[in-house]
Image: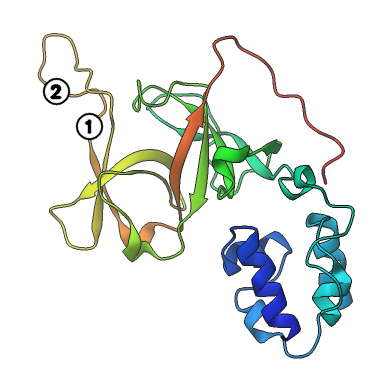
């Protein structure tokens, strides 16, 4: 088995896609498939830093086992830390929140056993998706790389060059568009008009797409305490 095939075996063991793994080590798309005989020292250092239980000797030579000998069952289930973007997933309108698509990561959070396939987490603001997602809750997300594979009726975080919103995607009446719908059906007083009306977004304008895997929320407020030990 080649280095490339062993690396793919490890990626599969971690329940990651090749693209997600490449992004995690700062490599470009197609890097894994381009590996011929060995891996550059810079990438090896990054792999060791992020995937500490991987036996590098096994990866490079095939000797030994995939995981380090000292890796117990608890280490195998090592906590997965994913980036948290705070104040960027906007549920409603008129909220004071950071809409910049390229905003900085606030910290890293533990994805937990339920969200081992999550690649990102974001805090929700606004009430257009209430009661499905309460303002202040955190959604676990998985990036979607092929826009043809979306499931209508499911919730996604849609990002364009202008905004990032969490909505339920439905079929649009217009070709090349998705209909972004809110869960909250609250109406203006003395009117049959929805406060959070659905809107169309051109698919070509969507720069990044994440599927919502689930969400968590606290019944009491608590500030985020950054983990300074995570780079």
Q: How is the image coloured?
A: rainbow
Residue 84 sits above or below residue 68 on the image: above
Q: Residue at coordinates 56% horizontally, 47% vertically from top-left?
A: 118
Q: Residue at (82%, 63%) from the top-left corner?
A: 46
In the picture, residue 127 is in which quadrant?
top left
Per the image, the residue denoted by label 2 is 193
Label placed on residue 197: 1
Q: Residue at x 61, y 12 (%)?
A: 221
Contact between marks 1 and 2 (CB within 8 A): the answer is: yes
Residue drawn at x 55%, y 39% is 114
Residue 92: mark in rendering: none
Q: List x then y, in percent, for residue 129.
A: 35, 28
The reply to whether residue 202 is visible in this rendering is yes
Residue 223, given in percent of the width and then of the height, sits at: 69, 18
Look at the numbered disc 2 and give the secondary structure of its residue: loop
Q: Using the rendered view, name the quadrant where residue 21 is placed.
A: bottom right
Could you say whether the residue bearing mark 1 is in a helix, strand or loop? loop
* Residue 176 percent across, percent down from the top left: 23, 63
For the residue pair 63 and 131, the one nearer the viewer reads as 63
Horizontal relation, residue 70 to residue 13: left or right: right
Q: CA distance from mark 1 to mark 2?
A: 8 Å
| 81, 99: nearer the viewer | 81
């Amino acid at each position: 088995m080649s280095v490339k095939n062993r690396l793919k075996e490890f990626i599969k063991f971690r329940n990651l896609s090749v693209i997600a793994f490449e992004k995690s080590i700062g490599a470009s798309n197609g890097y894994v498939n381009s590996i011929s005989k060995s891996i550059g020292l810079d990438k090896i250092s990054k792999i060791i830093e992020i995937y500490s239980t991987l036996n590098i000797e096994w990866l490079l030579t095939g000797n030994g086992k995939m995981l380090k000998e000292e890796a117990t069952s608890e280490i195998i289930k090592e906590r997965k830390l994913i980036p948290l973007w705070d104040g960027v997933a906007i549920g409603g309108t008129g909220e004071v929140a950071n809409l910049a698509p390229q905003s900085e990561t606030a910290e890293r959070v533990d994805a937990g056993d339920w969200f081992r396939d999550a690649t990102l987490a974001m805090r929700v603001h606004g009430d257009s998706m209430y009661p499905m997602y309460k303002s202040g809750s955190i959604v676990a997300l998985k990036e979607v790389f092929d826009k043809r594979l979306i499931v209508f009726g499911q919730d996604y975080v849609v990002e364009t060059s202008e905004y990032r919103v969490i909505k339920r995607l439905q079929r649009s009446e217009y070709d090349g568009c998705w209909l972004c719908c809110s869960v909250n059906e609250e109406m203006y007083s003395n009117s049959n008009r929805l406060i959070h009306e659905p809107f169309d977004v051109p698919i070509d304008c969507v720069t990044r797409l994440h599927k919502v895997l689930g969400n968590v929320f606290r019944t009491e407020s608590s500030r985020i305490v950054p983990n300074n030990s995570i780079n």
